[in-house]
Image (spheres, coloured by chain):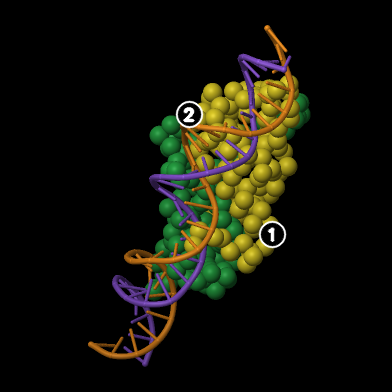
Chain colours: A green, B yellow, C orange, D purple
Amino acid sequence: MGVTKTEHFTEEQNELAILAKAIGHPARIAIIQHLIKVNSCVCGDIVNELPLAQPTVSQHLKELKNAGLIKGSFEGNAICYCLDEEGFNKIRGFFNQVNTYLENKKNQCC
Amino acid sequence: MGVTKTEHFTEEQNELAILAKAIGHPARIAIIQHLIKVNSCVCGDIVNELPLAQPTVSQHLKELKNAGLIKGSFEGNAICYCLDEEGFNKIRGFFNQVNTYLENKKNQCC
DNA sequence: AAACTATATCGTAATATTGCAATATAAATA
DNA sequence: TATTTATATTGCAATATTACGATATAGTTT
């Protein structure tokens, strides 16, 4: 149906899924990597960095912002975007669990 | 268009996006968490754990497998699924970069 | 205020995802 | 070999995502 049955899952599962889904697009990976690379908070030149039209980039930025992975602050008529620790902290716990499990668990059957 | 312009992005960006996208659904988060919880490699009882029909679960398992996040091995007429380190290792590097950046970088503007 | 610059929103077309009933496949057992 | 059990595939309807042109909004500069 294209409609996810979120009500059947825990809040944590839904939250993690929203975060991972937001990261799950090459343009949004590129945005995150660019914000890390240009040490200062970069503004609208993200548009110039990406091979996509301005409205498309704006849409991707909005999705990252809604997920809590980036945040923006006004700076004149431009907007300054940077990574939002909060979102990344939430997802870190999940991957830590996975990694801890994989380290201690020498694959048994598969 | 619903069609991602993968050709404009690096292979790494596309690969990371595929992995994150595969994780980006509450049912697939639940599957991963379940495989961690039941210490041994669990088989088709994943279907019983999830609030979704068998074909839907099968589809989610397929997506996780295609992304390289789980793998399965035959065990009689059942199939034993467990986490695939390879996929998770690939994504770990990305999050390590993000976390290292966030630790060293006291948010300046946002 | 008018023109310019930067970003967001709207509308829409193309495509992808989600979910499931029905059915197929394949191994295990009677 | 017929039946049962476990999983995958097919087909389809409902919904979501991606991309972008056109346009709106809001701050800046002249």
Return the residue at label 1. B11
Which subunit holds the residue at mark 2? B
Return the residue at label 2. B51
Residue under the image location 61 percent in, 42 percent down: B63
Label 1 environment density (alpha carbons within 10 Å; few <14, some 14–19, many ≥20)? few
- Alpha carbon of mark 2 to alpha carbon of mark 1: how far? 35 Å
Is B62 situated left or right of D14 in this image?
right
- Where residue A57 sits in the image (x, y, percent)? 49, 66
Residue under the image location 50 percent in, 58 percent down: B2
B78 is higher (above) or lower (below) than B100: above
Is D1 situated left or right of A55 in this image?
right
Residue under the image location 43 percent in, 31 percent down: A8
The tally of labels here is 2
- Where residue A92 sits in the image (x, y, percent)? 57, 42
> Quick check: marks 2 and 1 in contact, CB under 8 Å?
no
Q: Nearer the viewer, residue B52 or B23?
A: B52
Q: Nearer the viewer, residue B82 or C13?
A: C13
Q: Is residue A96 visible?
A: no
Is B27 situated left or right of D30 in this image?
right
Q: Amino acid at mark 2?
A: Pro
B52 is higher (above) or lower (below) than A45: above
Q: Quadrant of the C terminus of chain B?
A: bottom left
Q: Which mark is residue A26?
A: none
Element marked by disc 1: helix
- Where residue B70 sits in the image (x, y, percent)? 67, 37
Element marked by disc 2: loop
B33 is higher (above) or lower (below) than A44: above
Residue under the image location 74 percent in, 30 percent down: B73
**Nearer the N terminus, badge 2 or badge 1?**
1
- Where residue C12 sits in the image (x, y, percent)? 38, 66
Q: Nearer the viewer, residue D9 or C18?
A: D9
Q: Amino acid at mark 1?
A: Glu
